[in-house]
Amino acid sequence: MGPRLEDMSAPARLAGPDEGISAQELALAARNHGLPLEALRYEVTPPGLHYVLTHYDIPYAEESDWRLVLGGRVRRPLLLGVDELKAYPAVRQRVTMECAGNGRALLTPRPVSQPWLVEAVGTAEWTGVPLRVLLAEAGAGPDAVDVVFTGADHGVERGVEQDYQRALPLDVARGEEPEVLVAYAMNGAPLPPQHGYPLRLVVPGWYGMAHVKWLREITVTSAPFRGFQQAVAYRLRQDAADEGEPVTRIAPRALLVPPGFPDFMSRERAVRPGAVTLTGRAWSGCAPVTGVEVSTDEGRTWHPARLDPPDAHRWAWRAWRFTWTAAPGRHVLGARATDADGCVQPVGQPWNRGGFMNNLVQRVPVLCLDPDGDG
Amino acid sequence: MGPRLEDMSAPARLAGPDEGISAQELALAARNHGLPLEALRYEVTPPGLHYVLTHYDIPYAEESDWRLVLGGRVRRPLLLGVDELKAYPAVRQRVTMECAGNGRALLTPRPVSQPWLVEAVGTAEWTGVPLRVLLAEAGAGPDAVDVVFTGADHGVERGVEQDYQRALPLDVARGEEPEVLVAYAMNGAPLPPQHGYPLRLVVPGWYGMAHVKWLREITVTSAPFRGFQQAVAYRLRQDAADEGEPVTRIAPRALLVPPGFPDFMSRERAVRPGAVTLTGRAWSGCAPVTGVEVSTDEGRTWHPARLDPPDAHRWAWRAWRFTWTAAPGRHVLGARATDADGCVQPVGQPWNRGGFMNNLVQRVPVLCLDPDGDG
């Protein structure tokens, strides 16, 4: 008996109490990358700074060869090239996207997977065709339940060989608010390879796992989809044996641009005494953000920040600012968002075995230098 | 006495024998990123896939406000806006750039710094003005020795507060082969923020630390430059007290596109039995690559690969390919480059305290699945 997939693919596990980041986690961190937090300055994230997570390899694709199939329980299956998709009326949406595993590497115990700190986020302008337009044209049958999206990325995960696949309930797939897009452009240019070139799904308000990249097939089904990424991964479980709740929409979060300047290695920040303007962004995929508070004393006290008023971009982050008077010493800064559903970012970790939906408040240690010292 | 910079900035160190990747190394890995190895397929690396290393923060810049000063030991100091630089005859060069610390996290013992595996590389087309043209116009004085380049990125490193600065000897700075550029475009578009927008230095054949980003000052000096990044960092030392040799040009290296498909977590590869085409790229900043050999048995035997002939792009990588007949079992693949200086990639680690210039042969474990198994 020769080698089998199980020989290269182990079950999910939690890190031991004193276990440093493993070589496997480092390999993921070296491939995938977050938003450097100073890039929160940009309302729309420039190319290359938006977070990226690729489960397997980035497929090699040529736009001219690409075909999207829309089939399953429909009356008129569609087969569309990218040019044909571009012939539909285009919709452009600004969307803040976040990885469901953001914050995972800060959890105790730490689920061993892509080791994000807090930076797995980005905002882009996506251009494409509303999925509801394509579904209406194809005519989803009366028994339709789920819409399954298949990407061209192929690999093994926890012993299961697969193309990346996720589903949305039919009512979400053909919803108008949010409006799901089959996107072919990011910030006005063709999708970069790592963001799904030539086609990807964009599901405003949902965590990144729903935004299937390298999209080649859309299948309407009459039974709930039970594929690996739906039924095994991306569920909230306290114990491995739990069925778990599915991960769906983005929980509220605020992040701040770390002020001052950093140390190369520790990434700690230094500021000079006096007024320091703190700025950042806040978002929620559940309901609009209604407030941001800032703490400069490690969460003991909270002060309201000035939040930008709502604008046309419901599914994108909003800017906030706060003036802090820094005095010499060590400080820990943080910000927390509240949304219109009344959800507030927690100050204690929301833990589950996958390390999903962890919107624990960011912790930014800052050293305010003594004006008479050598700083 | 209040806090000082030393309180946030520790000396360089080596990891202990069983020390996993630390939280500080992970924070660097989450910010900076390598080239996902499947992107070796592209002759010119698409935006966002080229490796990036930022010592401090990415500065926020507006092209219209940017001024480059060329001064020091010159007869006619220059003050140039980006538009003025664009008025000079433009030169476009394809350049493979690699971080001097590439491979560091695979060393034993491991120097604690940016924890690269092997992927800190990329190739871009840079457009700009030859530095020698600007130096000639300014008229470097007869006592000129070094040319110092100052970026707008500011931070602390090993206790030293600094703007990022590096120097080149005058003869390198005004050389024609390689020709150093003050670049304003990458792959035909303005530089992305993380690659130095709006201006950076490009020094073909040299490791990345020489290609100063966010370039705002060029200073001709009559004494050798002794700044931190020149005299303290980026030197080859066996002991902390050594003066050390400076890191300059890129040592030869070949990398292969890992074949087959990966496991999400282990990043191990699976292939089916039979002919597998292995492809990759090879480069050297010292002398042209003259050969690439491939091993499929963990370095016990080596076989010549087919290397693309030389082309107009002396300072860019060259493609190679090799056909491997995979049989069921575990294999370790690797490739090694030789250049015209006779330098060959080593099969044992070249170790120094900074983890620089480590061009140890890549190690790609592959599982060839049993055709009768479940794979």
Image: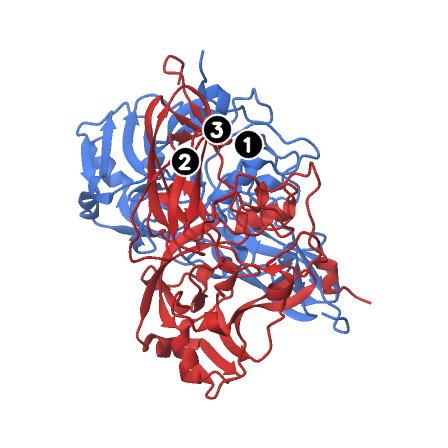
Chain colours: A blue, B red
Q: Nearer the viewer, residue A222 or B177?
A: B177
Q: Residues within 10 Å of mark 3 (few under 14, many from 20)?
A: some
Where's residue B328, x and y in %?
41, 19
Q: Tell me where residue B234 sits by quadrant.
A: bottom right
Q: Is residue B108 above or below residue A35?
A: above
> For residue A233, which numbered disc appears in the image?
3
Q: Residue furthest right?
A: B1
Cβ atoms at labels 3 and 1 below 8 Å apart: yes
Give how far across and how far down residue A149 sits, in percent. 33, 32
Q: Mark 3 or mark 1: which comes first in sequence?
A: 3
What residue is shown at x 43% (from left), y 73% (from top)?
Answer: B174
Which type of secondary structure does the marked residue at label 1 adopt? loop
Q: Nearer the viewer, residue A262 or B177?
A: B177
**Which residue position holds label 2?**
B294
Give the Cα distance between marks 3 and 1.
8 Å
Residue A238 image position (x, y, % from top left): 60, 27
Chain under disc 2: B
- Amino acid type for the residue under numbered disc 3: Ala
Tally the marks: 3
A8 is higher (above) or lower (below) than A135: above
Q: Is residue B81 visible?
A: no
- Mark 2 lies on a secondary structure that is strand
Comparing labels 2 and 3, the label whose residue is closer to the camera: 2
- Chain hosting mark 1: A
In the rendering, which numbered label is found on residue A354?
A: 1
